[in-house]
Image: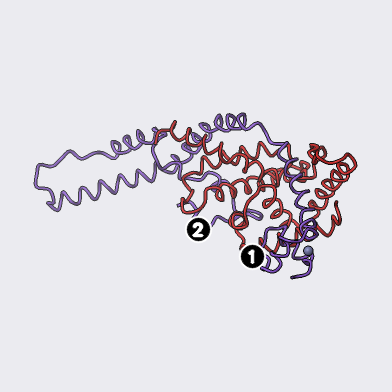
């Protein structure tokens, strides 16, 4: 049977890291090594309980968070609309240009339909944008917008970046 | 999706994750600030939900937001010249030592926990961070690696060093 674990092995066991099979078997059967590992584990458990006593009232915290949500979402929506409108205006002009091109090249057999004006399309877009429930505006991450990834920040992984 | 539906679903998410978020924040900012920073983190998560990639774990994504919010709060406090209370070094702590032991041992245990807090505060920053996320926020090694954007091998090495150093410095605490 393996002799007592080295101090390094005890530390690895406390940290929850893999130790080799003989060391693991020894630890299971040895009161001395187990007690040594348990010393720090016990203190950590007490410290964790101490920290938990500082926790806020969870129901109050939930209410306070929920109370803050509409304002936060509204701010983002307004910010989003600032750049979204010119983009939509450009898109509307392109749609018109393509539509006129098709009509002039004789692509339509029936009588020509009345052409929607850029203003009509933008008015429709504004109406859509005034509805906070439309999907899309929430894809903008105001937080990434507001902060440069300076020292100390965790770079978002590519799969988590805004896109 | 109806706005109310979003809110109800998010309220449920808050209920499920607020303890972890608070405990993570508590490891970076003092007890007085942890609640406010945890709330900021969850509000940010709500406004950033669209950027969440469902292929990654929601808890990891949320933990990253919480950690960045804490670092942001700490930087802002430093910029504004505010005193930054080292997390874990706050004065008063609740007396939660084991009560099934005699008074003398209780007192020894109390002192040992105080020494743990002191030694922990002296750990190199990365070791301290990983130690606290592992044992107090109860995150597993892969979660810590993902939340800190480091390799899991780094987490293991740093955690082992932290535990070993604490055990050496604390000595016999029985
Ligand atoms: Zn042994």
Colour in which chain A is drawn:
purple
Residue B56 circle label: none
Task: Tell me residue A16's x, y (percent).
Answer: 68, 58
Colour in which chain B is drawn:
red
Task: Tell me residue B61's x, y (percent).
Answer: 55, 49
Task: Tell me residue A79's x, y (percent).
Answer: 48, 39
Residues B21 and A88: in front is: B21
Seen in the image, is A106 located left or right of residue A72?
left
Q: Quadrant of residue B122?
A: bottom right
Q: Give the structural element (helix, strand or loop) at label 1.
A: helix
> Can you identify the residue that label 1 sits on?
B153
Instruction: Determine crowd level at label 2: few under 14, some 14-19, many 20+ residues with C-alpha closer than 10 A.
Output: few
Residue at (59% x, 50% y) in the render: B64
Residue at (34% x, 37% y) in the render: A125
Q: Is residue A148 above or below residue B13?
A: below
Residues A138 and A55: in front is: A55
Seen in the image, is B85 located left or right of residue B65?
right
Chain under disc 1: B
Chain under disc 2: A
Q: Is residue B119 above or below residue B73?
A: below
Q: Give the structural element (helix, strand or loop) at label 2.
A: helix
For the residues labelled 2 and 1, say whether their Cβ atoms are less than 8 Å apart: no
> Can you identify the residue that label 2 sits on?
A158
Q: Quadrant of residue A111?
A: top left
Q: Quadrant of ligand 1?
A: bottom right
Task: Tell me residue A123's x, y (percent).
Answer: 32, 34
């Amino acid at each position: 049977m393996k002799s007592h674990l080295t101090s390094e092995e005890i530390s690895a066991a406390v940290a929850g890291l893999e130790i080799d099979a003989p060391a693991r078997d020894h630890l299971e059967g040895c009161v001395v090594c187990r007690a040594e590992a348990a010393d720090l584990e016990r203190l950590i458990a007490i410290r964790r309980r101490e920290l938990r006593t500082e926790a806020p009232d969870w129901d109050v915290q939930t209410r306070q968070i929920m109370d803050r949500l509409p304002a936060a979402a509204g701010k983002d929506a307004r910010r989003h609309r600032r750049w979204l409108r010119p983009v939509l205006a450009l898109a509307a002009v392109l749609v018109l240009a393509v539509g006129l091109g098709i009509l002039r090249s004789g692509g339509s057999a029936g009588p020509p339909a009345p052409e929607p004006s850029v203003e009509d399309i933008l008015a429709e877009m504004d109406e859509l944008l005034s509805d906070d429930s439309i999907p899309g505006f929430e894809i903008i991450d105001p937080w990434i917008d507001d902060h440069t990834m300076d020292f100390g920040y965790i770079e978002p992984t590519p799969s988590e970046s805004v896109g | 999706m109806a706005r109310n539906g979003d809110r109800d679903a998010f309220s449920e998410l808050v209920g499920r994750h607020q303890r972890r978020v608070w405990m993570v924040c508590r490891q970076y900012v003092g007890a007085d600030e942890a609640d406010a920073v945890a709330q900021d983190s969850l509000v940010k998560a709500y406004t950033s939900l669209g950027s969440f990639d469902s292929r990654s774990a929601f808890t990891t994504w949320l933990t990253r937001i919480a950690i960045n919010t804490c670092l942001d709060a700490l930087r802002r406090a430093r910029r504004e010249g505010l005193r930054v209370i080292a997390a874990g070094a706050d004065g008063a702590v609740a007396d939660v030592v084991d009560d099934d032991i005699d008074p003398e041992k209780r007192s020894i245990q109390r002192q040992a926990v105080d020494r743990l807090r002191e030694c922990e505060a002296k750990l190199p920053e990365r070791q301290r961070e990983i130690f606290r996320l592992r044992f107090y926020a109860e995150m597993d090694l892969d979660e810590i690696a993902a939340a800190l954007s480091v390799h899991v091998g780094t987490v293991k090495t740093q955690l082992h060093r932290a535990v070993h150093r604490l055990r050496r410095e604390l000595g016999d605490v029985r």
